[in-house]
Image (tube, coloured by chain):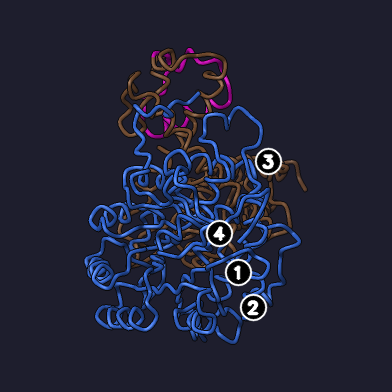
Chain colours: A blue, B brown
Amino acid sequence: MYEKDGEKYFVVDTHMHYWNAAPDNWVEGAEQYAKGWIECFYGYHGLGPENTRWPLEKYQKYSEEDLMKDVFEEGHVDVAIFQPTNLTEWYKEGFNTTERDAILYEKYPGKFILNTRWDPREGEDGLKTLRHNVERYGCRGVKLYTAEWRQGSRGWKLTDPEAYKYLEACQELGIINIHAHKGPTIWPLDKDAFDMTDVDHAATDFPALNFIVEHSGIPRIDDFCYMATQEPNVYAGLSVVVGALMHARPRFFARVMGELLFWVGEDKMTFGSDYAIWEPKWQVEGFVDWDYPPGAEFDDYPRVNATSKKKMLGLNAAKLYDIEVPPEYQLAPDQGTPAARDDAVAVTADSPTATSA
Amino acid sequence: MTTTTVTTRSRVSAALETVRDPELDEPITSLGFVASCVVSAAGDVRVRLRLPTYFCAPNFAFLMVADAYDAVSAVEGVRHAEIVLDDHFASDAINTGVAAQAGFVRSFDGEAVAELGQLRADFLRKAVLAGTDLVCRPLLAAGATPAALAGMTLGEVPPSPEVDRLRQRRAELGLPAGDGDPLLVDPATGAAVGTEALPLHLRHARTTRVGIEANAGICQGMLRVRYDTRGEGEEEKR
């Protein structure tokens, strides 16, 4: 929780990790990919404030103590949601698996929500594992990384017939939150791997599920906005949006926020730190302090206030994940309903704000 | 160094400036992607390219290496061009494929089904939309009404580098780009955008531009974290 200027913020970090990318976890023969992956993450890390940067060695493998301190003691986070990414072709015990996250989930009751993951290319075995994880950990969300490499395959789409079997299984098992994350590869490689048309189709075909598009579709923010405004069950995950832009490129950050607030709306945007890419402390504090810089280019974007930020920092996610929020952190009845699906902007040429002045 | 080498060298630099990142719609030189460029007295050119991450999308990476090869090879005085992409997961496939002029499908055997023309066209359309915002925003700020914009031709827009660029991108796509053609066209069909559809069209244009520029900002930030040297022809930080 975080308090500033008399306003109380309940903070849900919807996208964070407990990874091991140290060299002793690199798969023999795939060292260059394991190294390339974590160094790519380290490039993102460098976009945060200088005094929050870690040496590469610590970044490759940080401790449980680091995580608990950075996220909860200093990072203002009330509840953190683990989003696993396996990458077992490159990392012997995986990069950031459900099992590794479960160590902390089980040790600190109430602190974490444990999401799991699936990959349609794993067939029946993967479905069994999914069922097992839901039974054991009560998972209510999954992280889907479509660019994961597997046995020569460079990725998959949510519209693959096998993926639909998994989405059906999610519905049946009570998993309601699908965090979709695009990466740089897919089959075939000549297509744009970041294209989100498949998420759009899946969101239409599975209206009972929520699709949280991580990083708000970066590097396809525009495509994401046009899709999200048409789908009541599509949400914007703000991880990377805040981390990569708020400090390093504040004017771009303001424009991206303006676009998201216009097309998606403050009820459907959820904060995530992407820890340990960046620590949550500076992100939460900076986000609470944030407003548009002066300049006509920002004038026609929707305004933000403490209520908007309360929703984005925690109340929207609390609603999606059914997290109990202490009364003093909730909104007053006349301040709106977090995560309201019908608050989708559904922007058309007739919308009062669809002017370009 | 002979005068000929100097001349060839400056022509090669100019050729590299015409090569764009198809996704960011900026020259690879100003983005800092050209790590080095060496021209021998005999006209052998060796260019090293670099990208913000090891995992940048391989299709865009291929296009930049292939375009650089074509641009440099066409320079008068160049006997042989070698373009090398460094530090990328697909460096070998891309470098070998481009050197052999094998195309994308053959360079990524079994992993691709088509060449990259469609991908390039998709992103050119985005560049047209983003360019539309760049051109229209100052006009609106100066008091032009949306209805006036809808009736405007390209020739009626005051000259600027932005409008030249917009026309060039439209021409590349085969869209109308002459003086008498409408300022606002649908980048998929080339049809004029009517007054009714105009507000949303301009909103899309702006969002597209924000997306591209935010990406470019992230890419340049990450490139700087990855490499602490300035690229050939890289501009001072904007």
Q: Residue at x 45, y 74 (%)?
A: A114
Mark 4 vs 1, N-terminal side? 4
Residue type pointed to by label 3: Ser
Between A96 and B63, the one lying in front of the other is: A96
Q: Residues within 10 Å of mark 3 (few under 14, many from 20)?
A: few
Chain part drawn in magenta = B151-179
Residue labelled with disc 4: A10
Residue indicated by mark 3: B10
Q: What residue is pinned by disc 1?
A: A276
Between residues A308 and B203, which one lies in front from this camera angle? A308
For residue A9, the mark is none
Q: Indicate the amino acid at tag 1.
A: Ala
Q: Secondary structure at mark 1?
A: loop
Circle 2/circle 1 CB separation < 8 Å: yes
Precedes in sequence: disc 2 or disc 1: 2
**Marks 3/2 same chain:** no
Residue under the point 53% across and 72% down: A17
Disc 4/disc 3 C-alpha distance (Å): 59 Å
Chain of the residue under the numbered disc 1 shown in the image = A
- The image position of residue A65, as x and y in percent, is 66, 80
| Residue behind mark 2 | A62
Q: Are discs 4 and 1 located on one and the same chain?
A: yes
Residue B137, placed above or below residue B42: above
Q: Is residue B235 magenta?
A: no
Residue A241 at x, y percent in the picture = 55, 52
Q: Amino acid at mark 4?
A: Phe
The chain identifier of the residue carrying mark 2 reads A
